[in-house]
Image (spheres, helix red, strand yellow):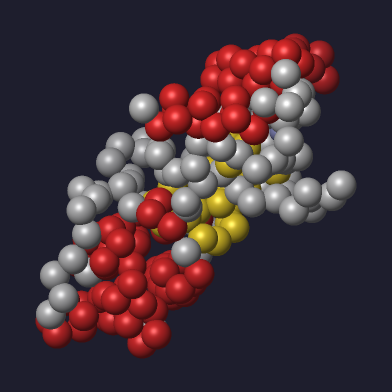
């Protein structure tokens, strides 16, 4: 029975597992996102999120506690500096796991784990106008917006910039 | 310790295995580029997930 067996051993013994998670946590803090397997990402999430919460109180004591886990001076510096200032008003849930398909070779389920506050594209209000060209069938917002612009362009090509300006104003309202 | 009394016949083994079935993955199309995408996965073509740019992809053309 697997009743209340919460820790995924990841096929490693305790020391190996701890060191791997420490290395992964340091990498995540330093580079903000890492590619790994889903199982490791989920284990890492449980490992690193309490450390990030710890970084909200910047004291020598909490720094030493975190260093005890990470064993990486640069990562601790980054965590209590840049990362802490970004995540300060987020009540937990600092990481995001995005599944990206299966790995060639062993068909392992891969994912991207990242610090939520460092992905500017994905976070709610950031940049509604996307730079990429939409090729396929797009539903929802894209249809109405693109339809409107098409109509304006066909009616008067000369006034196109003016018309676009008006639509922009509307959007801002 | 308990031991098997009789060898299981191939028929018995194969009958047991009739319930081992491969399951086809649920497939959808990307809302951004229309490529075929497995559900709950980031689009491998354009990096979109749930209608938003999740992963930066360098566009080939
Ligand atoms: Zn796509």
Q: Residue at x 79, y 53 (%)?
A: A105
Find residue A168 and report its horizontal and vertical position in percent: 50, 31
- Is residue A12 or residue A22 the one in the foreground? A22
A152 left or right, relative to B2 = right
- Is residue B5 or residue A31 the one in the foreground? A31
Count of numbered circles on the image? 0
Quarter of the figure with residue A4: top left
Find residue A149 and report its horizontal and vertical position in percent: 65, 21
Q: Residue at x 65, y 43 (%)?
A: A131
Q: Residue at x 73, y 13 (%)?
A: A155
Pick the quarter of the image with the C terminus of chain A: top left
A126 left or right, relative to A87 = right
Find residue A118 and report its horizontal and vertical position in percent: 43, 57
Quarter of the figure with residue A117: bottom left
- Is residue A57 or residue A146 the one in the foreground? A146
Q: Is residue A80 above or below residue A4?
A: below
Ligand 1, image quadrant it occupies: top right
Find residue B3 and report its horizontal and vertical position in percent: 58, 34
A43 left or right, relative to A110 = left
């Amino acid at each position: 029975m697997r009743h209340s067996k919460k820790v995924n051993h990841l096929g490693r013994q305790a020391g190996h597992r701890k060191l791997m998670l420490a290395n992964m946590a340091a990498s995540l803090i330093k580079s903000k996102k890492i590619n790994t397997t889903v199982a490791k990402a989920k284990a890492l999430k449980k490992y690193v999120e309490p450390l990030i919460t710890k970084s909200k109180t910047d004291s020598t004591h909490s720094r030493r506690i975190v260093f005890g886990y990470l064993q990486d001076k640069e990562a601790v510096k980054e965590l209590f500096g840049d990362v802490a200032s970004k995540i300060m008003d987020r009540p937990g849930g600092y990481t995001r796991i995005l599944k990206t398909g299966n790995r060639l070779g062993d068909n392992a389920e891969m994912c991207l784990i990242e610090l939520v506050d460092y992905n500017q594209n994905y976070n709610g209000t950031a940049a509604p106008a996307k730079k990429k060209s939409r090729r396929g069938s797009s539903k929802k917002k894209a249809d109405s917006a693109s339809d409107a612009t098409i109509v304006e362009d066909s009616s008067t090509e000369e006034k196109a910039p003016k018309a676009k300006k008006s639509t922009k104003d509307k959007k801002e309202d | 310790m308990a031991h098997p009394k009789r060898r299981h016949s191939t028929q018995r083994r194969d009958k047991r295995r009739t319930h081992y079935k491969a399951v086809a993955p649920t497939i959808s199309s990307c809302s951004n580029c229309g490529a075929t995408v497995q559900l709950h996965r980031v689009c491998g073509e354009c990096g979109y997930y749930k209608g938003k740019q999740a992963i930066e992809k360098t566009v080939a053309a």
